[in-house]
Amino acid sequence: MTLPTGVERHDFDGETSLATQGQPVYGERTDGDWRRWDPHRSKLGAMLEQGMDTGLEGGETVLYLGAAAGTTVSHVADFGGPTYAVEFAPRPVRELLDAAESRRNLFPLLKDARKPESYAHVVEPVDVVVQDVATRGQARVATLNKQFLTDDGRLLAAIKARSEDVTADPDAVFDSVRTELSAEYELLETARLDPFHEDHLGIVARPRED
């Protein structure tokens, strides 16, 4: 697996892990400028650990949906270009703002990923949409935000089965999401994110031409 430029495997107290260079955000272990990228706390980190071909090379312009307190998006900003971080809940945005203080390329947006018209005037065309929104209608969120992707861009989505239907079989949920996404995206790779995240599906896709 080829890692993006700016992401390396690094030794932390005898344990090898993904790492980026930047100010620590969530109590992760550090070694000099390097900070551990914990795949148990990051779906995108788990996708990289699982060897999924995300297409990330480093330096991409990114729209991150569901940024929460900045755990994963801070790592993305460490190796990416301009990174727009959308989060709906005010409390985690306060921590997200702290993560952005040392990252001039990280732009927190207190917005709802289900309403991209509310931030369309701010976000430029992006190379990557990372979606980690724990809400019902995750495929619809990806479809609504397709407008920001360049023609050869990538969707990197982490689908949480229990956010769609807590009573449904996760495989059935994932089949439904794949079917809905396929109307607007070409699915390049899908993989379960166990053992890092139970009942989650990682998806790599690119937009279909209109």
Image: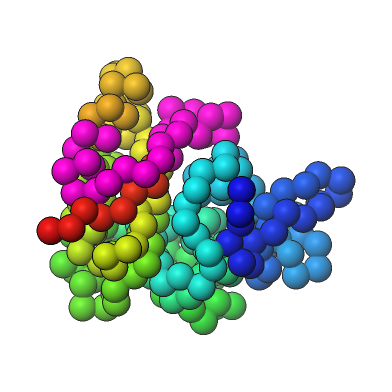
Residue at the left extreme of this rendering: 210
Start and end of the magenta stretch?
178-202
| Along the line of sight, the residue nearer the viewer: 169 or 4 | 4
Residue 71 as seen in the image, left or right of residue 68: right
Q: Is residue 4 above or below residue 44?
A: below
Q: Is residue 197 above or below residue 82?
A: above
Task: Please identify the quarter of the rendering in which residue 30 is found.
Answer: bottom right
Residue at (56, 47) in percent of width and height: 48
Q: Is residue 172 above or below residue 150?
A: above
| Along the line of sight, the residue nearer the viewer: 35 or 53 | 53
The quarter of the rendered structure image containing the C terminus is bottom left
| Along the line of sight, the residue nearer the viewer: 183 or 23 | 183
| Along the line of sight, the residue nearer the viewer: 123 or 52 | 52
Task: Please identify the quarter of the rendering in which residue 189 is found.
Answer: top left
Residue 36 in view, yes or no: no
Residue 38 in view, yes or no: yes
Residue at the bottom extreme of this rendering: 104
Where residue 2 appears, as percent x and y from the top left, is: 61, 54
Where residue 177 appears, as percent x and y from the top left, is: 26, 35
Residue 125 as seen in the image, left or right of residue 183: right
Q: How is the image coloured?
A: rainbow
Where residue 38 appears, as percent x and y from the top left, is: 64, 48
Q: Is residue 35 above or below residue 49?
A: below
Residue 65 part of the magenta segment: no
Where residue 167 appears, as percent x and y from the top left, is: 29, 19
Residue at (49, 28) in percent of width and height: 198
Residue at (53, 64) in percent of width and height: 57
Number of marks in the image? Answer: 0
